[in-house]
Image: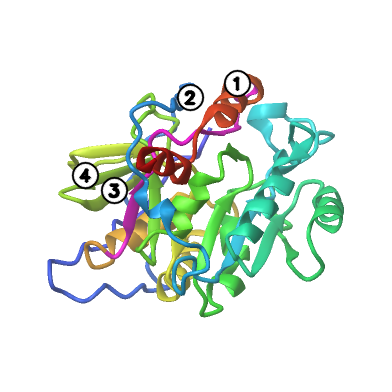
Amino acid sequence: MRPARRATPWPTPSPGSAPTAISLNERCAGTVAMRPAHVSPQFHDIDNRPSHAHLMRNETEPGSYEHMKAVMLAAGVGRRLFGDGNDDPPKALLQFDGRTLLARHIEVLMQLGVEELIVVVGHKKEMIEAELARVAPEGFARTLFNPRFKESPILSLARAGEILRSGERILFMDADVYYHDDLLKALIGSRHQTCILLDQDFVPGAEPVKTCVRDGVIVDFGKKVFEPHDTVGEWPGFLTMAPDIAYRVADRADELSQGDMPGFVYEDAFCDVMKASQPGTFGFEDVTGIPWIEIDFPEDRERAATEIRAKIAAYKPMAERVGDAAE
């Protein structure tokens, strides 16, 4: 279970004010309850989907798919999926249709013009490195080792601080997501420099990470949310950050990593920076209807191999649907 969180909420700027600066000396107070038992995720249907019209952009158009670096977290042991044993492979190496999740990620990232992939590794890092050597073009991917990979996930985000502070736009990715390519196309093709995805077709509960929106603006983000909102969706584990936001997230991740056993997850850093920023700094894209699943539990793995695999195969990308309508 996730340890009890103690954190001081960051001040939310009033409309028209400048973003609040992040202080590296800010410490923790207040509480968030322990994470309750797992609620199985919703498996995302392909009906009643939003338009995803931005997916129609010409990928060769200047500014359509801006070059960026991708940071992928793949350090964890996968206790909820495999148990406490250390002999199982990293979840990024789970295979569907003969390809690992990592190989699928790399194929999509290269198609979308991402210039480099940095994978934060820990558990069985040599297996990740071997797969990267097998499937990634030379110079495209590299790893950063988190020696404290058995502790809090916030440490893996903090380990990527040098990349987050590189001055480039960043694509953040969980490694354990199985999805149709349109999910990343919607994110990378968004007009928002800093963008979080949301899928409104989900089962509410303690387990999903939620993106909450009020009047078209993100107001809360995380497993435990408090702000009033009129729209809520599950976060599929991917987001983009403008260079200045990525830098601030790195600072906040460093803060939350202090102590022998930090009790935070990386969503806390994203949420704190979002709430300390000018409203609307973090945009969102609604990806309801695009098939995906995050693989955390044994039932997720089984459904990924059956229901989600079938939905990905049956899904008709936006560009094809629009083409059919025009004929």
Question: Does the rendering let one see residue 258?
Answer: no
**Residue 108, horizontal then vertical, whole percent:** 63, 52
Task: Identify the amino acid type marked 3.
Answer: Asp
Residue 303, which numbered label? Answer: 1
Q: Does label 2 or label 4 sit earlier along the sequence? A: 2
Q: Mark 3 points at which residue?
A: 220
Task: Look at the picture and state if 254 lies above or below 152.
Answer: below
Q: Nearer the viewer, mark 3 or mark 1?
A: 1
Determine the residue located farthest toward the bottom in the rendered image. Answer: 167
| Residue 269 belongs to magenta span | no
Is disc 2 in contact with disc 1, using a CB cutoff of under 8 Å? yes
Q: Where is residue 177 in the image (x, y as percent from the top left)?
A: 59, 40
Seen from the viewer's position, the closer of residues 172 and 44 is 44
Binning the other alpha carbons within 10 Å of mark 3 as few (below 14), some (14 to 19) or many (20 upward) gives many
Q: Is residue 259 left or right of residue 325?
A: right
Find the distance from the CA under tag 2 to the CA under tag 1: 8 Å
Q: Give the range drawn in magenta.
A: 281-300
Q: What residue type is labelled 4?
A: Glu
Give the residue at the far left of this rendering: 15
Residues at marks 2 and 4, CA–CA distance in whole angstroms: 26 Å
Disc 4 to disc 3: CB gap under 8 Å:
yes
Q: Nearer the viewer, residue 59 or 215?
A: 59
User: On the image, numbered disc 2 is attached to which residue?
Assistant: 43
Within 10 Å of the Cα at label 2, are there few (<14), some (14-19), or many (20+) other Cα atoms?
many
Give whichever of 227, 71 is nearer the camera: 71
Image coordinates of residue 6 in percent, x first then y, are 39, 49
